[in-house]
Amino acid sequence: MDTFVQLVVNGLGKGAVFALLALGFVIIFKATEVVNFAHGSLVLFGGYLVVATRETLGWAGAAVVGVLSAGLLALLVERLLLSRSKLASPFSLALLTIGVDVIITEEIVRRLGVSLPFIGDAWDAQPIQVGDVTMFRTHLVAIVVATVLITLFFLAFRYSNWGIAMRAQAENKEAAALSGVRSWIVTSSAWLVAGLLAGVAVLFIATQDFSGAGLSRGTHSIALAAFPAAIIGGLDSTAGAVVGGLIVGLVDALSTEYVSFAFAKSAVFLVMLVVLVVRPSGLFGTKETTRV
């Protein structure tokens, strides 16, 4: 029982990070109907900037640089590439993001070479012992940080002018434009926010407690596990992104312990397939994922 409790806590910690990433997928999709397959490269880019600047700026300063850089890169991708392809279909733009992802990822992997640096952390990485339950401090910090950021997002999404404009554009882009909503502002801000969330996520992904590996191509693969999370929750549902992220984190933690590490990666996709068979729009979505 103690092992199960430990796995649940640590699974929720991983799930909190996946929730941040899945929320980035959903925000962009709601604003543009484009699936951003370059999300993993945004994570890598933010992590690389942390590693490159932490000796000069310290961990906190480097973390700020990494998060902001990931956000700005996402904004640049949208402004310099996607916004200039207004006549392209969402499918074509999704393919474009794959190209962007390959270019950025391969360049960062080339720069990293054989080194697999850990991001490092600003907190004591020693586990916390509560009775017979061992909890990783990194996962607990991730839960707290994700809870704060997700709460702030939902408050802004519900009550701010930006949130109202995004919901209006997601509902009916043409009607929103006729009502004075500036589509380019909504779209750009969606990419910016998604990039910032990716930059925060990598601070936890490339740590010993989370993945057991440093910043590498594997970090990119872990980040893309948030895509099934977004599908499970519903690609057009912000609440579903959070639920989907937690489900993926729990499935990964439990299947790793009770089956095998290799199966855990497949288990996430098996859950996604089951959800799509039962409910094609995802648990909370309104648009059928199979038609996206």
Image (spheres, helix red, strand yellow):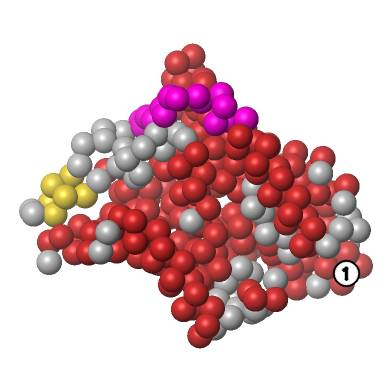
Give the x, y percent position of residue 174: 88, 69
Badge 1 marks a residue whose secondary structure is helix
x 47%, y 35%: residue: 216
Which of the 4 image quarters holds residue 261? bottom left
**Residue position marked by numbered label 1 in the rendering:** 174
Instruction: State whether residue 50 appears in this view.
Output: yes
Query: Most extreme residue toward the bottom, as rendered?
Result: 278
Region in magenta: 107-122
x 34%, y 45%: residue: 210
Specify whether 130 is left or right of 58: left
Picture quarter with the N terminus: bottom left
Amino acid identity at mark 1: Glu
Between 277 and 134, the residue placed more toward the observer is 277
* Helix, strand or loop: magenta stretch: loop
Specify whether 109 is left or right of 249: right
x 64%, y 47%: residue: 38
Specify whether 136 is left or right of 143: left
Residue 286 located within the stretch drawn in magenta: no
Query: Most extreme residue toward the left, as rendered?
Result: 131
Numbered-mark total: 1
Give the x, y percent position of residue 130: 12, 51
Q: Looking at the image, is 267 positioned above or below residue 132?
A: below
Give the x, y percent position of residue 132: 8, 54
